[in-house]
Image (tube, rainbow, N blue to C red):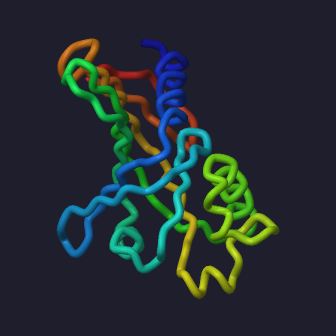
């Protein structure tokens, strides 16, 4: 499979869903949390309470994994994304403004967490401890059991863009 073809499949799959399972290590044990996301290139934006278990864990160890998938009745139909990367809280006004616009376009209901100027309101952020995060994808595996049990394609990612040559794994 060519890089452009795999990238197109992955982007269409990401855009078909709105919730991802974010996985990390919390207090030495595996932890996962479902969160809404919006796509920025091949990176993913999400927001959460800075006091949540996953936010606390990611502050200590930014390495994380994400899964995006649908509900399937038969194993032959299973498709999904398994993504490894790093998470960081967005801090700069420019990154917050850009991420907020992308996120609100995808999830308008979240406007109550943001100010009218396009970034998290200081007062609201202090009161609710809501933070915007960026999951920077490093490698994306696309699983497609319709091609055979456990057939996956790996695509490397750098700065939100596909790189290298896809590898079937």
46 vs 84, left or right, is right
Comparing 5 with 146, the one in front is 146
60 vs 76, left or right, is right
Comparing 135 with 119, the one in front is 119
13 vs 93, left or right, is left
Q: Quadrant where the N terminus lies?
A: top left
105 vs 61, left or right, is right
> Which residue occupies 60% across, 66% down?
90
Q: Quadrant of residue 139?
A: top left
Q: Measured along the vertical axis of the image, is residue 91 above or below residue 34?
A: below
> Which residue occupies 57% across, 65% down?
132
Percent x, y of residue 140: 40, 36
Percent x, y of residue 159: 57, 44
Q: Measured along the vertical axis of the image, is residue 105 above or below residue 168?
A: below
> Which residue occupies 61% across, 80% down?
125
Q: Quadrant where the C terminus lies?
A: top left
């Amino acid at each position: 499979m060519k890089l452009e073809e795999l990238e197109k499949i992955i982007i269409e799959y990401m855009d078909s869903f709105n919730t991802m399972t974010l996985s990390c290590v919390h207090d030495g044990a595996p932890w996962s949390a479902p969160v809404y996301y919006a796509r920025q290139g091949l990176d993913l934006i999400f927001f959460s309470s800075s006091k949540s278990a996953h936010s606390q864990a990611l502050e200590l160890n930014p390495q994380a994994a994400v899964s995006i998938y649908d509900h399937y009745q038969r194993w032959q139909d299973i498709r999904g994304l398994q993504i490894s990367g790093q998470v960081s809280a967005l801090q700069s006004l420019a990154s917050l403004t850009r991420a907020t616009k992308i996120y609100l376009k995808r999830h308008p209901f979240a406007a109550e967490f943001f100010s009218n100027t396009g970034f998290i309101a200081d007062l609201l952020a202090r009161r609710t401890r809501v933070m915007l995060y960026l999951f920077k994808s490093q490698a994306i595996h696309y699983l497609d059991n319709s091609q055979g049990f456990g057939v996956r394609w790996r695509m490397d990612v750098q700065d939100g863009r596909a790189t290298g040559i896809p590898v079937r794994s």
